[in-house]
Amino acid sequence: ALIRGNTDLAVETKTGLGGTTICFEALRGGQIDMYPEYTGTGLQVLLQPSAAVLDSLGGRPDAVYGYVQREFQRRYGLAWRAPLGFNNAYCLLMRQQQARTLGIKNISDLGRYVRR
């Protein structure tokens, strides 16, 4: 919709392609031209770096993006475009009454509870 609404390019939208691996292989095989992907998924699922590399990135979004961008170019000749501008970080989901009873408001609280 963004391309169609902001350019004169002809666009065919394909939905329901499946997960990351299916979309990635379709991109590499030339069946699709682009698809949105999370940097964390590109890192963990497609690049599968060593624990040492993951530790060096430290969960820092800019470091992860830079690494993914460089490695996709080096390994696959694929370019990661600029981030779309949102974060899809994981969160803690818990029943409200249980969270209140246990005094858990965040992951740090959960860690303290588990270590007791």
Image (cartoon, rainbow, N blue to C red):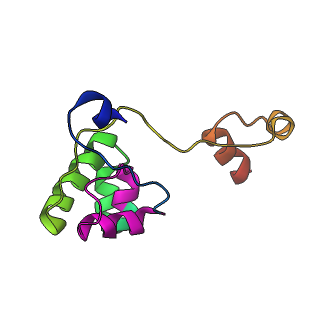
Above or below: residue 15 compared with residue 51: above
Q: Which residues are magenta?
A: 18-43
> At which x and y percent is residue 52?
30, 64
Depth check: 39 or 26 in front?
26
> At which x and y percent is residue 42?
34, 58
The answer to which quarter of the image holds residue 112 is: top right
Q: Residue at x 33, y 36 (%)?
A: 84
In reply to whether residue 86 is colored magenta, the answer given is no
In reply to whether residue 36 is colored magenta, the answer given is yes
Residue 49 seen anywhere in this rendered image of the structure: no
Q: Residue at x 46, y 54 (%)?
A: 15
Q: Residue at x 86, y 36 (%)?
A: 97
Q: Residue at x 29, y 66 (%)?
A: 31
> At which x and y percent is residue 115?
69, 52
Quadrant (top left/top right/bottom left/bottom right) for the N terminus:
top left
Depth check: 59 or 3 in front?
3
The answer to which quarter of the image holds residue 9 is: top left
The answer to which quarter of the image holds residue 73 is: bottom left
> At which x and y percent is residue 10?
25, 43
Depth check: 34 or 40 in front?
34
Point out the residue furthest to the top here: 6
Depth check: 33 or 86 in front?
33
Residue 108 seen anywhere in this rendered image of the structure: yes
**Number of on-image labels:** 0
Above or below: residue 32 compared with residue 8: below
**Left/right of residue 108 with respect to residue 53 in the rendered view:** right
**Left/right of residue 89 with respect to residue 81 in the rendered view:** right
